[in-house]
Image (cartoon, coloured by chain):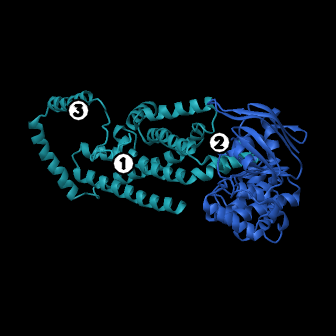
Chain colours: A cyan, B blue
Amino acid sequence: MTTATAPAFPTTWSRPPFIKRAWLRWTLYLGALLYMVLAVGSVEVNWMRVWEGLDRGLRFIQGFLLPDFTSRWEDILIGMEESLTMAVTSTVAGVAISVPIGIGAARNIAPLPVYAVCRAIIALSRSFQEIIIAILFVAMFGFGPFAGFLTLSFATIGFLAKLLAEDIEDIDESQAEAVRATGAGWWQIVTYAIQPQVMPRLIGLSLYRLDINFRESAVIGIVGAGGVGATLNTAMDRYEYDSAAAILILIILIVMAAEYSSGYVRKWLQ
Amino acid sequence: MLRLEGLSKVYGTGDRALTDVSFTVEPGQVVGLIGPSGAGKSTLIRCINRLVEPSAGKISLGDLDITQLSRGGLRQARRRIGMIFQEYALVERLTVMENVLSGRLGYVGFWRSFFRKFPPESVENAYRLLDRVGLSAHVNKRADALSGGQRQRVGIARALEQDPDLLLIDEPTASLDPKTSRQIMRLIIEICDERGLPAIINIHDVALAQQFVQRIIGLQGGKVVFDGSPDELDADVLTRIYGEEDWSATIRKVDEDAEGTEDSAEEIAAALDRERLAGLT
């Protein structure tokens, strides 16, 4: 202990491995590798079909190079109009329903039973992909945009209520405490301490959901829930790749426009 | 008058924050509450308006037993207790005026507050208070556009807008520079004097407490270990509150100070600032 020589410190250091036991670490690595090799081996590729498909793919790309906006313009216009209507109405309805559910699903302001119910609604809405819900609603309410509207509204709840609830749980608690200390009631605390803190994010998320809903409206059209997806599906079925390309290009343009404008609005809100 | 009797708080985690705390605050008296971090200062003042639910004991404000109140009764009692916070706790995205008017939330209904339709006398009072704390020019600014000192003034105006019978003040100067700290403390003391308001001020800075308050309560491990005038604070008492340390530079020289309180206030402030810079407080 009292020797005059300085203790010898090591000159190398390496980060301790995430899994400490070496044999377990190597077993896991080898196991993962083996599984991957087997999994890749089990995929059957029909090379004949790939060859035939190449030809079709080529025509598709050609269609894209020469998109045809004119010959199906009427159908495209109706489809787009339906899709946009579906996107806007379902976002408005979805947000209107999501806000109370989101508030109820925030553990820091909602009592436990309300919290449990609201979280259950969110989980239910999130557990199914839009297409599955769309198939269900098409079966219940028939083909057309109404089924699409219901699908997208329902999907919006799971998305928006969950993110809103999480945002409310992340608020600066001291601001809420200060408002509570003045003798404010529960609703006053929500409107004076919580709403100002979460509003910019709520608006940002709603705009984001609007363009998700527009994109989804194109997808659920394929299972019969109206919108431009139905038009796209028809064009594909008829091998009219040039019209299909026109539709895809329009979708891209609209999503881009939504992206830029929502970015601008969000910046302005802060 | 505020009276605490046998107040105790045990958190759900089993931590004993307060043990059998009893004292009385007379009308118009400003009490400084000192003690190390974790001594229970914040818990104590939050128990008084039941932002933290006390485990045992009795708190009476005038004739009202706060610990026995129902939810509605508690809201009414909270209206009478103004609170000022460490990091100001202003609602940052609301305007200065909305923050001050939120002091009236306990008195107006939900829809009136939602549409910001406060009674004319409340609005008038808010303007008067903002003028009193020197913020007339910032009425429509957002709270997060103000400096620290200005924000704390808004916090003070919000508490006063409640027209309270008691002020609870939690570390009002903890995030402010030494000069602003003194200005804020002076403002709080002046306002308490003007209105004969009793107040409890949690404070970390012993020298600042000595300079401004009439009575000091020392808390250690959730128990009251000192209750007396600022002049009685000596090395022994500070050791009892905070533990062993060299206190010689922290303690105000009582005899020197008694002679020249009025004319040497600037000097004292400067000396205190030096102490703070030296890291002794």
- Tell me residue B238's x, y (percent): 72, 48
Q: Mark 3 points at which residue?
A: A29
Circle 3 crowding by C-alpha within 10 Å: few under 14, some 14–19, many from 20: few
Residue A173, how many percent across, how many down? 62, 46
Instruction: Identify residue for label 1.
Output: A228
Disc 2 vs disc 1: Cβ atoms closer than 8 Å?
Answer: no
Q: Which of A219 and A228 is in front in this view?
A: A219
Q: Which amino acid does label 1 sit on?
A: Val
Q: Do the residues labelled 1 and 3 touch (CB within 8 Å)?
A: no
Q: Can residue B49 be seen in this view?
A: no
Q: Percent position (x, y) of residue B106?
A: 78, 47
- Name the chain letter of the residue that bears numbered label 2: B
At a point 80% along the width and 59% down the height, the residue shown is B254
Amino acid under disc 3: Tyr
- Can residue B266 be seen here? yes
To which chain does the residue with label 3 belong?
A
Q: Residue A122 carries which label?
A: none
Q: Where is residue A92 in the image (x, y as percent from the top left)?
A: 53, 48
Residue at coordinates 41% horizontally, 36% vertically from top-left?
A134
Q: Is residue A140 left or right of residue A177?
A: left
Image height of A74 relative to A97, above or below: below
From the viewer's perspective, is A153 left or right of B197? left
Mark 3 or 2: in front is: 2
| Dot placed on the residue nearer the N-terminal end, 1 or 3 | 3
